[in-house]
Amino acid sequence: MKRIIVEILALSLLLGCISEEKEEYTINITGLAEGELTLTELKTMPFEEFNAVLVKSTGTKIENSWKGVLLSDVLQKCNVTPDYITFIAIDGYMSTMELSDLGNAYLCYEMDEKEISIEEGGPIRLVITDQPGKLWLQFLKEIKLLGKENSVVIKGKTRVTLVLTAEDLDIFDQKSITTEYKGETKMFEGVPVTALLNRARYEEDAEKIKFTSADEYTVEFDFDEIFSNEDILITKEFRLIMPGYESKYWIKDLREIEVL
């Protein structure tokens, strides 16, 4: 119900945007490349027409014909090859996938030989022919290009994969702690790991959690041990702060949190 209400609000906002901009609906491109892609520009690019079956979480299958542009062609214009891409809808709903899983992803602007209406999630929809329907994002408004070198990835036994840059960490409530590190008392500020795990929606059968640095140094803990301690933080410098633990567990250049 909450998702439906949010979509109604987004629809109202989107209608306002369309009425003001007419056909100049714009997708923002952020992250490793910065720019914009208007609906008009998208329509000038080489396109494909194809049939695809959307499979809902209930198992219901819906087949439609689509017209759109390969995501890889859009990325070629950006002149960048990201490791991950986050797709963001106008209501803030998002999904993140590895580039290797997006070979059959399209930015579509027609469905069943008609322009995609606002009510149908348009004017631009993400269609991924070999992925579940839950990843076919409606009301697409932003494409965020992310690399492993400037982000931390939360994945594994989670319902969504999170790829967060230092700027993304600002959306979370920050926490300050004072603790001893290498014989000195210091203050640290960051985001509790518990907040990130909650946002990634960890699976109930999670047993372990593994932290990996840029140089592939890893430490592993029981999941409950980490989740029960809200003083374990990640700073904007991607440093893992582990109060009460030996310094060997305080990872610098953290790049991956994997729930096992």
Image (spheres, grey):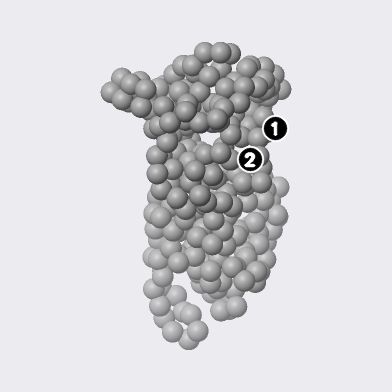
- Secondary structure state at the residue bearing disc 2: loop
Q: Amino acid at mark 2?
A: Leu
Q: Position of residue 128 (x, y in %)?
A: 63, 32
User: Pointer 2 and pointer 1: residues touching (CB < 8 Å)?
Assistant: no
Could you tell me which quadrant the C terminus lies in?
bottom right
Circle 2 packing at 10 Å, graded few (<14), some (14-19), many (20+), is some
Type of the residue with mark 1: Asp
Which residue is found at the position 59% from the left and 29% from the top?
Answer: 127
Residue sitting farthest toward the bottom: 183
Rendered residue at 45%/23% (across/down): 123
Residue closer to the observer: 61 or 4:
61
Crowding near the residue tagged with mark 1, few <14, some 14–19, many ≥20 C-alpha atoms within 10 Å = some
Q: Would you say residue 243 is visible in this rendering? A: yes
**Left-right relation of 224 to 243:** right
Q: At 60% across and 44% down in the image, what residue appears?
A: 97
Label 2 vs 1, first from the N-terminus: 2
Count of numbered marks: 2
Quadrant of the rendered structure where residue 41 is?
top left
Q: Which residue is mark 1?
A: 130
- Left or right: residue 66 versus residue 191 is right
Residue at numbered disc 2: 102
Tell me residue 59's x, y (percent): 71, 22
